[in-house]
Image (cartoon, coloured by chain):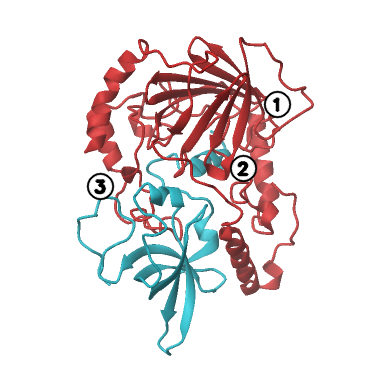
């Protein structure tokens, strides 16, 4: 049998097994904490449409009224572009809700698992995407 | 719906491939230039349950594509995106039609077994890195460091996204620009095999040394002089040898095939095939270092984890980088 590491390098790097979870530029598990889910509601302050991952920054008002600027990691710009999402799709001031996982270093950064507009519409879905016309997620 | 039409059309395209003649460049080479999409939902290795079945029917292939997204896989293996929202779902992507059940051709559809020596190298490599994976940036994979992505090859393999490349041709050269980490491979082209020798054996490179020649309308690229540092295949040695074949079989189709051999790693050579299709979009800038917040976040996460660990459990830092 081929040793595990060599096989994993090929399969993980290429996202080559359709049944396996797809891999991205880096290890999500290394950067974000799956045991630290966060739900953020805030207004977009900046969208960085950059490789290898896009970053969306939002101002979140806490229960104490204090505003904290969070950075949320998203997909690669080209993957998003080909789904019709451009750097102007999310203007500054847009209110969004982010369901995600906080960074392992406990900073104000998260990976965006789900991003939705305030009215419940999900972001980034392509026209032919499964679930695009299906039930909305409840928050 | 469009996938059905594409897949149903694919069989006649293959049948017509031999009759279709590619346009020529100004100096008479078959013209392979343009932006090509080499994404695929077909796995490199065939799933065990398919046995020796090498091809799907068009209906089976369309169904397979639709299965790309199967609910919320967001937390599979750790924190992750919802694949339906970030362009990582295969069913949302546009792929070249492909009825293959695995990119690797032949009845087995698998990477051949490793030699015992390769298994020993793997084990030693794993042991050497264990516990030091997050010591510093040098310990992280080349792709994560924005230096070189393991799928840019040779041989080239599809990744989860950004499967776009652009081919340029000029007199005596073909250049392949990969979108991901903006790698360019410049391949000297000669009229026939052996026209221009490889670099001396003392010169070794991560991506090897490529030489090309034309066989009728097929560009054949021979690559040797790999570094043996396991950039693409963890156990591969300096004797790694890759032969690639590029054949434009239709206006919008480029067939890519490669054979990989390394007698010090695998018990026999293996061959894979991947169709590419013309992409109407441009290559997007890949300024990887500038946007690589992931590296800082990963290391700061590891340091936070270190701080929570008892001092006796901490590994001494400093190891040979990958």
Between A106 and B108, the one lying in front of the other is A106
Compared to residue B2, the image places residue B293 above or below, namely below
Q: As displayed, is residue A133 above or below residue B93?
A: below
Q: Chain of mark 2?
A: B
* SS of the residue under disc 3: loop
Residue in view at x 40 percent, y 21 percent: B107
Disc 2 to disc 3, C-alpha distance: 33 Å
Q: Which mark is residue A128?
A: 3
**What is the total number of numbered labels drawn onto the structure image?**
3
Name the residue that disc number 2 marks.
Answer: B148
Circles 1 and 2, Cβ within 8 Å, touching? The answer is no
Q: Quick one: label 1, few (<14), some, or many (20+) residues within 10 Å? A: many
Pinpoint residue B85: horizontal percent, then vertical percent.
35, 56
Q: Is residue B128 left or right of residue A7?
A: right
**Quadrant where the image shows the N terminus of chain B:** top left
Residue holding disc 1: B225
The colour applied to the residues of chain B in this rendering is red
Give the image location of residue B132, x and y in percent: 68, 56
Look at the numbered disc 2 and give the secondary structure of its residue.
loop
* Residue found at x 37% / y 57%: B82
Q: Percent position (x, y) of residue A62?
A: 42, 84
Q: Residue at x 55, y 29 (%)?
A: B155
């Amino acid at each position: 049998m081929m040793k595990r590491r060599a096989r994993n390098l090929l399969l993980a790097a290429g996202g080559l097994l359709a049944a396996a979870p797809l891999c991205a530029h880096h290890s999500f598990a290394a950067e974000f904490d799956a045991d630290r889910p966060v739900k953020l509601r805030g207004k977009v302050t900046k969208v960085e449409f950059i490789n290898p991952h896009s970053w969306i920054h939002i101002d979140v008002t806490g229960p104490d009224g204090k505003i904290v600027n969070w950075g949320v990691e998203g997909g690669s710009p080209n993957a998003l572009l080909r789904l019709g999402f451009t750097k102007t799709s999310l203007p500054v001031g847009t209110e969004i809700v982010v369901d995600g996982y906080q960074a392992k270093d406990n900073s104000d950064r998260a990976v965006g698992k789900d991003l939705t507009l305030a009215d419940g519409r999900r972001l980034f879905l392509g026209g032919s995407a499964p679930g695009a016309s299906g039930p909305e997620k409840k928050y | 719906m469009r996938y059905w039409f594409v897949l149903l059309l694919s069989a006649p395209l293959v049948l017509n491939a031999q009759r279709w003649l590619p346009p020529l460049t100004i100096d008479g080479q078959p013209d392979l230039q343009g932006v090509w999409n080499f994404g695929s939902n077909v796995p490199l290795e065939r799933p065990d349950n398919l046995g020796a079945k090498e091809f799907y029917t068009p209906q089976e292939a369309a169904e397979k594509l639709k299965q790309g997204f199967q609910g919320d896989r967001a937390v599979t293996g750790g924190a992750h995106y919802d694949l339906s929202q970030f362009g990582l779902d295969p069913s949302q992507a546009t792929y070249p039609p492909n009825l293959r059940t695995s990119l690797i051709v032949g009845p087995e559809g698998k990477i051949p077994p490793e030699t015992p020596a390769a298994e020993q190298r793997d084990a030693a490599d794993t042991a050497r890195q264990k516990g030091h994976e997050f010591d510093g940036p040098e310990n992280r994979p080349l792709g994560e460091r924005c230096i070189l992505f393991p799928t840019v090859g040779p041989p080239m393999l599809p990744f989860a996204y950004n499967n776009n490349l652009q081919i340029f041709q000029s007199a005596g050269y073909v250049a392949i620009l990969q979108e991901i980490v903006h790698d360019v491979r410049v391949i000297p082209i000669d009229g026939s095999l052996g026209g221009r020798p490889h670099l001396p054996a003392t010169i070794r490179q991560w991506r090897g040394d490529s030489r090309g020649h034309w066989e009728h309308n097929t560009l054949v690229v021979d690559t040797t002089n790999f570094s043996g540092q396991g950039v693409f295949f963890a156990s591969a040695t300096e004797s790694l040898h890759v032969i690639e074949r590029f054949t434009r079989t239709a206006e919008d189709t480029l067939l890519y095939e490669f054979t990989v051999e390394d007698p010090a790693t695998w018990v026999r050579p293996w061959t894979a095939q991947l169709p590419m299709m013309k992409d109407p979009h441009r290559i997007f800038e890949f300024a990887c270092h500038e946007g690589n917040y992931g590296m800082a976040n990963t290391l700061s996460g590891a340091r936070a984890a270190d701080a929570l660990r008892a001092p006796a459990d901490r590994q001494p830092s400093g190891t040979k980088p990958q």
